[in-house]
Amino acid sequence: MKTVLIVFALVALALALPLFWTPKTLPEGFDRNLPWQITLDASGNSEVFGLTPGKSRLSDARALFGDDFDLAVIAAANQTGALEVDYAQRSFGPLLARLILTLEASPEAIEAMRGRALRREYKEGSNKKFTLDPDDRARAEDAVIRAISLIPSARLDEETITRLFGVAAETRPEGETLTHYLYPEKGLDIVIDKKGRDILQYVAPGDFAARIRAPLETPASSK
């Protein structure tokens, strides 16, 4: 019984750490691959979790995080979809999170993958999941990572976001439940969902306007 209580206490501590520690106060061992550790090179490219959006490839992610991932085309109703790599749960310092990598693929290539899919199933409401055939999986190995999404187990709030990431360049509401905290210079969009899971979206800073800002400025009726 005592062992069980200790395990629960350690899990609770791990989930709470991101809410109380800033980058300068992290203890030894929790100083790498943290969500707020975004570095920029001289060309303005960003790196987070050891990956560079717009440059790193799936093979790079496998070298860092292993082979325990799901690779499929995920498509909402009436949309072509995106090629995604889903690591169900990873540890980033004290933080447990789901890691999703969106790979670069043309609409034509995605349509072709859907046609060759081994299995089709519904996933998360009306979204469809198309499991790739072996040849498409092999070809995806060299695909560039277009975007990185992190879905943390711990909930975020504005105070925590500001303490860990700095003051957002812009804050934008979306609908009744979502708020976006935008960091264009870092290629980062933090989305707080009052009724769902929070999400951190990383793209190359040079792609921020097209991939993050433009969709926010598109009327909901035309999305």
Image (spheres, grey):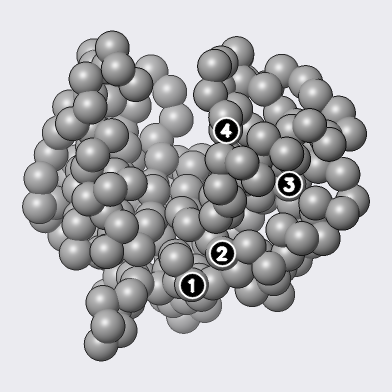
Q: Amino acid at mark 4?
A: Gly
Kindly report the distance in space between the C-alpha atoms of the residues bearing marks 4 and 2: 16 Å
Q: Using a 10 Å C-alpha cutoff, classify the residue at mark 2 as few (fewer than 14 neighbours), some (14 to 19) or many (20 or more).
A: many
Picture coordinates of residue 160, whole percent (x, y): 24, 48
Picture coordinates of residue 37, whole percent (x, y): 35, 70
Kindly report the distance in space between the C-alpha atoms of the residues bearing marks 4 and 3: 13 Å
Front residue of 175 and 218 = 218
Please identify, in this view, whether the residue under mark 1 or under mark 3 is nearer the observer: 1
Residue 20: tell me if it is visible. Answer: no
> Residue 57 vs residue 200: left or right?
right
Q: Secondary structure at mark 3?
A: strand
Judging by the rendered image, the residue that carries numbered circle 2 is: 144
Q: Amino acid at mark 2?
A: Val
Picture coordinates of residue 153, whole percent (x, y): 51, 40
Judging by the rendered image, the residue that carries numbered circle 3 is: 71
Q: In the rendered structure, which disc, 3 or 2, sits on the residue that comes first in sequence?
A: 3
Q: Using a 10 Å C-alpha cutoff, classify the residue at mark 4 as few (fewer than 14 neighbours), some (14 to 19) or many (20 or more).
A: many
Where on the picture, by quarter, is residue 8? top right
